[in-house]
Amino acid sequence: MPVSTQPPNRVIPALALSALACVWLLDFGLVQPNRIVSGTGYGLYAATGWLGAVVVSSLLAVAVGLALRPTHKRFWVLALLLITALMALPLLLEMLAQRKLPEDSAYARIGIGAGFWCLAFFLALMLLETLGQLKASRRLQLSTVLLIVAGWWFCATREGLSSLSLIREYANRADQFTQALTTHLSLSLGAVAISAVLAFGLALAMVRRERLRRPLLGLVSFMQTIPSLALFGLLIAPLGALSAAYPFLQTLGIRGIGWAPAMLALIAYSLLPMVRNTYVALMEVPEPVVDAGRGMGMNERQIFFKLKLPLALPVIIEGVRITTIQAIGLTAVAALIGAGGFGTFIFQGLGQAAMDLVLLGALPTVFLALAADAILSALKFQGASR
Amino acid sequence: MIELKGVTRRFGDAVAVDNIDLTIETGEVCVLVGSSGCGKSTTLRMINRLLPRTSGEILVDGEDINKADPEALRLNMGYAIQSTGLFPHWTVARNIGVVPDLLKWPTHKRDERVSELLTLLGLDPATDAIKYPHQLSGGQAQRVGVARALAGDPNILLMDEPFGALDAITRENLQQEMLRIQRQLSKTTVFVTHDIDEALKLATRIAVMDQGRIIQHDTPEAILRRPASAFVENLIGKGDRGLKLLALRTVGDVMERYPRPRQSDPLTEGLKETDSLRAALSVMVWQNSDQLPVLSEAGDAVGTVKREQLLQGGV
Ligand SMILES: Nc1ncnc2c1ncn2[C@@H]1O[C@H](COP(=O)(O)OP(=O)(O)OP(=O)(O)O)[C@@H](O)[C@H]1O
Ligand SMILES: [Mg+2]
């Protein structure tokens, strides 16, 4: 029987050993008497007892062993192992809660330590390497991510983790959280949608009229160079004056602070990547293709909709992708001028030195950006392969 | 019939096409030949109005083309270009079907037409139809380009170096096929090339262009025998114009036919009726023989040709 021998993988052992070192040397979790006090840290053994320590250590050891074996099948086994480990990771925190949380204190909570973060980080890197070795398809990658998220979701809803500081912060603000999510999404996606329409028009104008190209590109590039905080600030005065002069604007919610200036600034920032990509994409449709289309008897409309637009679409979507990720991040900053969204939690948390509140704002922002990236990349990929 | 009367095209101050008169009869292949930048493409593109003319008149079947709707005009003129201009996001079948689609042919008629054309151009309707242009070789892409130009069954074909950028053998094959298709369909064709051999091979009449003017418009034979100027003489090459003349005729034109086909000795190398006299002479010189049998496709001897007949054929 032919046996395919393969060189041992060195990346995964290196990552696993780093994880092992971090998990044993750094604090795995904390127990805090209340949300402000930093609390006491516990190492892996102290936090999860011998069971947790043995499971984690042997998992990493097995990963090293598997990675060194000379068969290709090892990567499938590794992938399964790592996915399961990542899905179940929050259970380790549950063990900490069970063992160390004082029964009587209503304010006591557990926090996530550096050791846990490192473990999660290195496991994720190992999984990435494994999927890379398996040449995993986009679909497999996406399902992996969804599986892990589902695992965490399941863990988070369990009673055992209700004392996790992050979940405490969430439980205290469940309504605000939903509202922040809606605001964040509608602000960023709304800005992207509006600027997409604007950018499309501007790009078309530039394609039609070469003379408009320099001034328009200059304008949108200039807007991009203003620091975001400054632009948010700059918009407060004129919008404030405007709404003072026309009270009906106030009833619409247009004031110096709030969603209106945030939306305007977000649109201003979104224009450059979108205009540039759309313009370049439309201009780079090969001349012979357009010439042939016209020579075949297509009219200008048909040339645009049948040839130029479909050929330009992947690059246009790429512009939308960049813009969406950027807008989701910037919306967090817009909380500073009272626009709402997840930034509210971040800045509140910073003000109160409550790190878990910061995380409650930061983690969903990151997650939204990653989700937008995944969805739009998939769309672009489909468009390009057609 | 296409008539150009005193047609001029300027780009700014530069004159690309300078007051040319040219008549292309129905069913004829007119080849525009000349060095780079002499205005061949410009002339061609004025015929389907991809470029407006600066002055003069262009008539198709007696009608001024400016009176017609440009899209309708182009739908009746097949157009093939050197860089093929295939639509990269469409399959071969959809590319070929573009004009039938624009003409709103029913789907089944279009699909039939597409596979008919794929077969005509030596492509496989089953496997090649579903490919995308980037999956084709250069030669296949050019074939698809020609098939696309033919798809709407236009009365007129405009071809701008459709076989440019191909290796000699593929080019030769495509020229053969072009001749075969032309014998079947006899479309009024304007064909642009800067390769004089291609022009001599394909043309009913050749229009030699230089600096935006037509220097000479005549049959290949007349161009070879009586070049109008030193420029034309240079273009056709003084050294081997005798051989080029021989290349215009085929063995079928000069051979002696047998009353009925005969069995031929399978060992003797024979000629084909469609071989040019030039190729036939080459075989004779190589074999050091004075006479060779002419074989049919099936391998029977249908006649014979002598060396003197070949040489006289060129005169
Ligand atoms: N769009 C244009 N703008 C300005 N000048 C042009 C344009 N198109 C063609 N010309 C000029 O017109 C002249 C004739 O060009 P044309 O494309 O007809 O040449 P051609 O005979 O087809 O050459 P080639 O064999 O290289 O294709 C050239 O000098 C060219 O520079
Ligand atoms: Mg040209």
Image (cartoon, coloured by chain):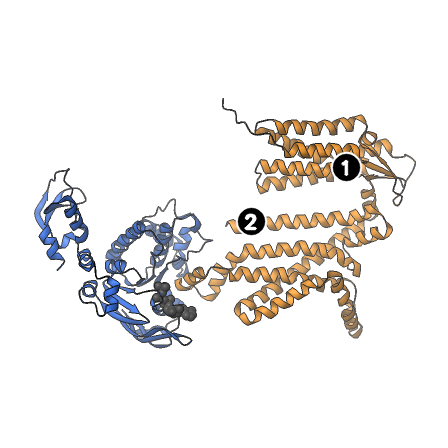
Chain colours: A orange, B blue
Residue A309 falls left or right of residue B56: right
Residue B309 falls left or right of residue B63: left
* Residue position marked by numbered label 2 in the rendering: A381
Q: Is residue A279 above or below residue B139?
A: below
Which residue is drawn at the image coordinates 69% and 63% (left, top)?
A225
Q: Is residue A323 visible?
A: yes
Residue A186, horizontal then vertical, whole percent: 71, 57
Dividing the picture into quarters, in which one does residue A87 lie? top right
Residue A191, horizontal then vertical, whole percent: 68, 60
- Near mark 2 (Cα within 10 A), the count class, few <14, some 14-19 or many ≥20, is some
Q: Quadrant of ligand 1?
A: bottom left
Q: Is residue B49 visible?
A: no
Q: Is residue A25 above or below residue B51?
A: above
- Near mark 1 (Cα within 10 A), the count class, few <14, some 14-19 or many ≥20, is many
Picture disc at residue B60: none
Q: Residue furthest front?
A: B239
Amino acid at circle 2:
Phe
Q: Is residue B82 above or below residue B284?
A: below
Residue closer to the observer: A39 or A309: A39
Dividing the picture into quarters, in which one does residue A197 lie? bottom right
Image marks 2 and 1: residues in contact by CB distance under 8 Å: no
Residue A49 falls left or right of residue A272: right
The earlier-in-sequence mark between 2 and 1 is 1
Residue A104, horizontal then vertical, whole percent: 92, 36
Which residue is drawn at the image coordinates 61% and 60% (left, top)?
A274
* Residue position marked by numbered label 1 in the rendering: A116
Which residue is drawn at the image coordinates 79% and 75% (left, top)?
A245
State how far apart marks 2 and 1 are (Cα): 35 Å
